[in-house]
Amino acid sequence: MAVPDPSRPLRVLHLEDSDLDHALVMAHLQRGGLQVETLRVDTEPGFRAALGQPWDALISDYNLPGFSGLKALEIVRGMGLQLPFILVSGEIGEDVAVQAMRDGASDYLLKAKLA
């Protein structure tokens, strides 16, 4: 996996159906000193289409209407993409988080801990 060039923004694909949660995640990344270029999608077709672009990392909500972060992870790994994949949820249990990590997620965050 290539290390992103620090002179350019970090390109993040964000799978999220909530405008507020998207803004919160972006604020935390920027507060951490990162210059971020992001695309937010909230459907499986939109997600699949966005995967045609180069990304440095993927951040995915766990539960979306008609789609899930685990399905997104399956799609990414099925395409052979080796990108950091971070699963974010307010409802994920430890067993689901552990399984997601076993399936190739890089990490997970609880929404309650983002605030």
Image (cartoon, rainbow, N blue to C red):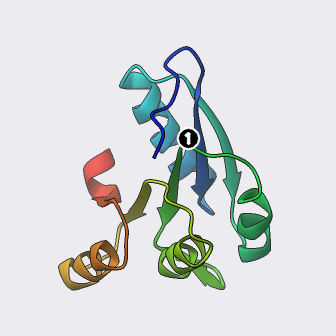
Identify the image quadrant of residue 105: bottom left
For residue 30, above or below residue 62:
above
92 to the left or right of 25: left
85 to the left or right of 100: right
Assign a secondary structure to mark 1: helix
Which residue: 43% across, 33% down?
Answer: 29
Identify the image quadrant of residue 94: bottom left
95 to the left or right of 4: left
44 to the left or right of 77: right
Q: Position of residue 39 (x, y in %)?
A: 69, 46
Q: Position of residue 2 (x, y in %)?
A: 48, 39
Which residue: 28% across, 83% down?
Answer: 99
- Quarter holding the C terminus is top left
How many numbered discs?
A: 1
Q: Amino acid at mark 1?
A: Ala
Q: State the residue in front, 5 or 62.
A: 5
Q: State the residue in front, 67 or 20.
A: 67
Which residue: 31% across, 76% down?
Answer: 92
For residue 28, above or below residue 81:
above
> Outermost residue toward the top?
7
The residue indicated by pointer 1 is: 23
Q: Position of residue 95 (x, y in %)?
A: 21, 84
Which residue: 22% across, 77% down?
Answer: 98
